[in-house]
Image (cartoon, rainbow, N blue to C red):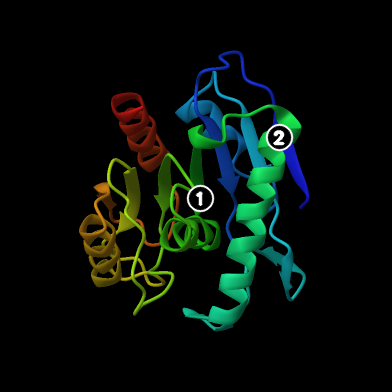
Amino acid sequence: MKHIFEQGIRPDAPTLVLFHGTGGTEQDLLPLAKRISPESSVLSLRGNVLENGMPRFFRRLAEGVFDEEDLIFRTKEVYDFLDEAAVQYGLDRRNLVAVGYSNGANLAGSLLFHHPQALRAAILHHPMVPRRGLALPDLSGTPIFIGAGSNDPICSAEETEELQWMLTEAGAAVDVHWERFGHQLTASEVAAAADWFRDQL
């Protein structure tokens, strides 16, 4: 996968794995990583799917309707890539924290839904429920931050609450930060994620 790796100054700090939103690139969330954990190594990915020329992490059939078959395939693709990158860059595979926005947050959420111990923790900005009718792995001890908009036109408050419930039922420790700026990723939401990261990790 096309990606950027930046070596951090604290080897024991969690490595941040960045997942951009639709139409983004592996450059987009690098400033967020500096805000959240400036001493961490960073592995920033670019999605392998194009929609009208815009990079995404998996296909969709319509707005808010995921191509589940492609989602499952791309989730495994990313999971395998993280295994390979951990070896290539000498990273602790058990110390990866996802930071995702929108489509990228959905892929990071899908990693949690499909693969036990895929991530140590996750910061999900405006995620949707990746899949329904699925028995989730045991997520006990996995801290998860969800940044959400109470008036998000793409991801409703009800969907955020459903995702929170599903992850909590699987044992995860979920904190939801609410704002009223629609689907936007705001500076105050990033600041809340950075505060959460310092408290949890």
Res 67 visible? no
Image spot of residue 90 (x, y percent): 68, 27
Mark nearer the N terminus (2 vs 1): 2
- Rounded to the nearest angstrom, the CA distance separating label 2 from label 1 is 22 Å
Image spot of residue 173 (x, y percent): 24, 45
Tag nearer the camera, 2 or 1: 2
The residue sitting at 41% across, 72% down in the picture is: 154
Residue that mark 2 sits on: 87
Depth order, front residue of 129/168: 168
Task: Point out which mark residue 16 bears.
Answer: none
The residue sitting at 45% across, 50% down in the picture is: 185
Judged left or right of residue 85, residue 32 is left
Judged left or right of residue 61, residue 142 is left
Res 89 visible? yes
Residue that mark 1 sits on: 100
Label 2 Cα crowd, 10 Å radius (few <14 / some 14-19 / many 20+): few
Judged left or right of residue 85, residue 93 is left
Three-letter code for the amino acid on which mark 2 is drawn: Val
Vertical placement of residue 150 versus 84, above or below: below
The residue sitting at 74% across, 76% down in the picture is: 52
- SS for tag 2? helix
Image spot of residue 6 (x, y percent): 70, 27
- SS for tag 1? strand
The residue sitting at 32% across, 54% down in the picture is: 138
Q: Are marks 2 and 1 in contact (CB under 8 Å)?
A: no
Q: How many marks?
A: 2
Vertical placement of residue 195 versus 141, above or below: above
Depth order, front residue of 187/98: 98
Depth order, front residue of 154/26: 26
Q: Quadrant of residue 134?
A: bottom left
* Image quadrant containing the C terminus: top left
The furthest residue to the top: 9
